[in-house]
Amino acid sequence: MRLLPLALLSTALLLTGCGDDKAPDATADSAADRTPEQAAGESGPTFFDRIDADTPYLFANLQRTPESLVDAMWAINDASADSNQAMLDAVAEDEELPPEARALVNEMSSMLTREGWEAAGLHTNPMFAIHGVSLFPVAHVELADTDAFRAKLDRIEAGLERPLSRRQIEGREVIWFGLEATLGIAVLIEDGVVTAGLVPDQPAVLSRLVGATDPVDAMAPGALRALNREIGLTPYGSGYLDFERVIARVLGPDPVIGALDVDGELDAFRNDPACPAEFQALATAMPRMVMGYSEMTETRADALLRIETSPSIGQALAPIARAPVSIDRELKGLMSFGMAFELLAARDFARGLVDGWVETPPQCEAFATVAEQAPQVQAALNRPIPPVVTNIKGLFLEADSLSFSDEGLPTGGGTLAFFMKNPQLLVGMAQMFSPQVAELQLEPGGEPQKVPVEAIPQLAGTGLEAWMAMSENAIGMAIGAESVDGLTAGLDRTEADPFLMTGRMDFDLLIDLMDVGMKSMQSSGMDVEAETAEMLEAQRAQYERMAEYYDQGAFRIALTEAGIDFVFEARLNADAID
């Protein structure tokens, strides 16, 4: 019976993927330069009156996602319905699958498309909120049709060996799935809303879950709007995880945690004077994680996750990514990947941390390993680093094409550049080990030099040729004549940016990878079963449909004085959406 409760809670949480709510002045309460597309979402119910003002974590929306973007996401989902159905069919055919799990799988198969989702009473663009009661997660998700949702649940229950466990909590019916003696999943279906929580079996907590007891101090929607303004997030989904509040609840007096009879496990930390202080120091260094959609329009869906740091930590981290090169570049081919790092700055940061641990070892038992290993780590950090290593400041790889040669080998073209303080040092080393490279006339700013095929045996049989070029602070290689111009431009000096790592991908890459993989199996003589071939073809068709809607995807990791940023971007094809 474990599958069913987990699936029900997962359904509630997965609904949060495309929704948001709008207060009367929401368009003025998020990122300052809101575009018309970003302000186009329809308002709906919010759940802030059921959320503690000091909740340790929150993710909620203030406004629905623009409907045009939701339409595009559901179109992509519907294109995957056949392959998803095939997977569910394979699961249902397992003879060892329990009857209740099979009943759930059969009902889930009718929810693989937007039409099936709506028929089950689920909202395709819901308002939602996920928050903590004490430290335990509770999710509220808007329904489109409460009666249809209840009917779907009844059909699932009809396929079970035993009926679902139901309780009356303050006059409201709650479906209860016991997981442990004092812990379970509670599900409440109200008019237009389903609430689910992984919570202790405690009257006070269940009363909060059903809404019979209000928070002592409820959160105001303006608190989330203020966060959005501070970070630059949209109202379509944002929130935080407050580490200081989490630690306070674990180590401090918390009636909910206390009633779980886990004090014995926590008392070792609570009663050690060093532990609260050292955990608090850790939370001061990294007080909070914030996340949300930073841009949401008809052609873009960008998200940010930031691990906030103290000013001193942020100032020490930022120089690590300040190598003299920009790796945040527009995509010109199928994919790109870049790294920029100052190794000596990273060592200085690590030394600062470890030296403190050696001088003042942590006393809390939770950090005993840190205290024990700090001297060895300090010794390792004090060893000299070879100049050839510190010389390298970053790299940038871009693949322009990917295909399958007549000889049965994956092939393609692109560029790879290494950025360094003194590229001639690397050239000199390469010339010592390769007579062919020694013959090349590589000079900073000179013309790209064609590399003898003997110097790169891996290119034999592919029909590809390679060129090398060098600038004042970089050396690189191009594979394929059509990539030579890109190599020259890619070696030009650029200003430093805050990014430690970046990557971009054209969604056509997924199709090319499928083609290369399928042709590779054919050329190797691999015996591919008909069913496997059909699944591969279905997967390729799914990627083709995705590429119709999605243009590019990207990620970036930045080190700033505000913290560590993880940025995720998706660009959509406007023509496909229209």
Image (tube, rainbow, N blue to C red):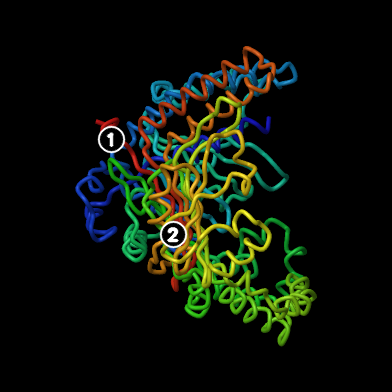
Q: Secondary structure at mark 1?
A: helix
Q: Is residue 577 above or below residue 392?
A: above
Instruction: Rate crowding at label 2 as few (under 14), some (14 to 19) or many (20 or more) other CA atoms within 10 Å.
Output: many
In the displayed structure image, the side of residue 274 where residue 38 appears, left or right: left
Residue 335, how many percent across, how many down? 46, 44
Q: Is residue 77 above or below residue 282?
A: above
Give 63 or 516, whichever is nearer the viewer: 516
Residue 255, how many percent across, how many down? 61, 62
Of the numbered discs 2 and 1, the one sitting upstream in the chain is 1
Image quarter of residue 71:
top left
Give 116 or 162, whichever is nearer the viewer: 116
Which numbered marker is on residue 327? 2
Tell whether label 1 touches label 2 (CB within 8 Å): no
Give 362 or 143, whichever is nearer the viewer: 362
The residue that appears at 49% across and 22% down in the rendered structure is 152
Which numbered marker is on residue 68? 1
In the displayed structure image, the side of residue 438 where residue 324 appears, left or right: left
Give 414 or 459, whichever is nearer the viewer: 459
Q: Residue furthest left?
A: 36
Which numbered marker is on residue 255? none
Q: Mark 1 is on which residue type? A: Ser
The residue that appears at 65% across and 69% down in the rendered structure is 251
Instruction: Rate crowding at label 1 as few (under 14), some (14 to 19) or many (20 or more) other CA atoms within 10 Å.
Output: some
The residue that appears at 41% across and 67% down in the rendered structure is 497
Q: Mark 2 is on which residue type? A: Ile
- Position of the N terminus by quadrant: top right
Residue 520, how many percent across, how many down? 61, 26
In the displayed structure image, the side of residue 575 where residue 569 appears, left or right: right
Q: Secondary structure at mark 2?
A: loop
